[in-house]
Image: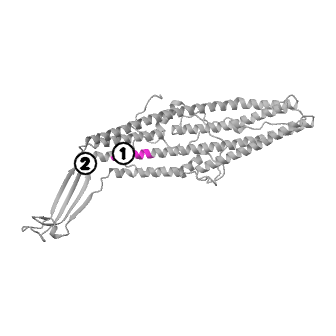
Amino acid sequence: MLGKRPSFEQPSLQAASSESDLLPDVQVAPVSHVVEAKQVVFDQSPSDERPPRNTEEPDADDGNEPEPVQVPTAVQDAPAPQPVEYYIARALQSHPRLAAARLRVAAATQEIPQARALSDPTWNNTFWPIEDNALQTAGGRIAHQMMLQQQVPWPEKLRARAAIASREVGIARAELEQAEREITEAVRLAYYELWYATEAIAVVEDNRALVSDLVTLAETRYRTGGAQQDVLRAELEAERLEDELIRLRSQRTAAQADLGALLQRPLELAPEPVRELNLPENAGELDQLVDAALACSPELRELAWQIARDRERERLACLQRYPDFQLGVGWSAVTEDDALSGVANGNDNLSFMLGMTLPVWREKIDAGVREAAANRAATARTREAEEDAIYGRIRRLLAEAEGLFQQLELYRTRIIPRTERTLQLATADYRGERVDFFSLIDIYQELLVYQVQIARMEASLAGTLARLDRAVGCPLPTRNAVSE
């Protein structure tokens, strides 16, 4: 599959232990928001919802500018949590990089009528203001001699130039799509970092209640003969949570700034993520992703358009072997006044002119053909290199995503439940004075790390899928997902 090269002809991501009546209950912090397996439909961004663009070469008359993406109007600049698609739509509508790319498409479209048009005709007038020095003929003195001329190239040359201009439009549109995909990816990555920081803060805040129970448990043991260092250690753990919250809140503010900058609102907008990430069940199959990349990748489409443009340039270079024409019509104003001829009649003269270039310097023409052919071959090799790079990127990201899927399954079904159970048993053993407090704290810290790690892996998986969609060029519709 990976060894095939596509044709360049068409341009074408709990059990509770027994507890002593003398000691307070210690409840494990809820982790449902990061532990439960949420398998829901992977929503597509507005730019993803568009069907793959027609990879046929564009019509030379096609000058329509792409329509801007519509932003949802249900919520306007509200601090309420919004899905990632909302922010993608806003970025695609307002980002200046995309506005510049759309203007470049419009500018390239206007080159087509210029390329197919003839050059401007020329008009000149030769006259003799000094009568004694005027040109004399048998018909009389020439007062004015006018000529209207038009350069007419070999007909196929105009068509080749128009075809080159139309390929430039395809290149500009592919560059626009690349910019859209890059902005979409950047918004997704910033959003997922914001989601992780928000989710990690929720996990740490949920664990405050558990630490509070541990402090109470240590104080109760201290009153019944336990060690005071247990109380201090529990209080130190509470302070460590505060330190972690400060770090996560700073990280969350930075992620909000990054996302706000992509939305052209870096100072006043504080985006809020929704609680659930809509993750698919799998990242897709390698063969399907590669086939989708061949059909969707804007980088490959741009290079295919460049190959088509270079082929037309080679054809135009070959056409230089044919002559160009020059047509003209002349009119001479003749007068009898001050005429030297005795038979002057003063009749005006009408003339026609036909000329053509002589393409005799074949060495120069052949060099131009060889230059154009070399450029076309170089672009073809560049496309092959880009294909290989995309194949490698897809394979690497797919392996990364599959690893994260497996890790999430392991954490959700085995590591987290067993750590929760171990913490519950250690709490009961501490009440029964069978383990020390440091062992209990170590287990609690492991559970907290695992809970935060779940959120980190979910955000990393979402980011990997976003980069995978970017590498493919479009979302893969065959990803299976079920609603929660």
Q: Nearer the viewer, residue 298 or 284?
A: 298
State the SS at label 2.
Answer: loop
Q: Which residue is mark 2?
A: 324
Q: Nearer the viewer, residue 247 or 21?
A: 247
The residue mark sitting in front, 2 or 1, is: 2
46 shown above or below 9: below
Q: Which residue is mark 1?
A: 164
Location of residue 337 in the rendering, given as x and y in whole percent from the top left corner = 13, 71
Is 372 inside the magenta-drawn segment? no
- Report the label total: 2
| Mark carried by residue 43 | none
- In this image, 264 relative to 416: left or right? left
State the image quarter where residue 317 is shown.
Answer: top left
User: Which residue is pictured at 28% across the width and 44% down the height?
Assistant: 320
In this view, which residue lies farthest toward the bottom?
Answer: 337
- Residue type marked 1: Ile
Q: Residues within 10 Å of mark 1 (few under 14, many from 20)?
A: many
Q: Main secondary structure of the magenta part?
A: helix
Say if residue 45 shows up in the picture: no
Boundaries of the magenta span: 161-172
The colour scheme used here is: one colour
384 shown above or below 65: above
Cα distance in 3D space between marks 2 and 1 = 19 Å
Q: Residues within 10 Å of mark 2 (few under 14, many from 20)?
A: some
User: Which residue is pictured at 66% across the width and 31% down the height?
Assistant: 409
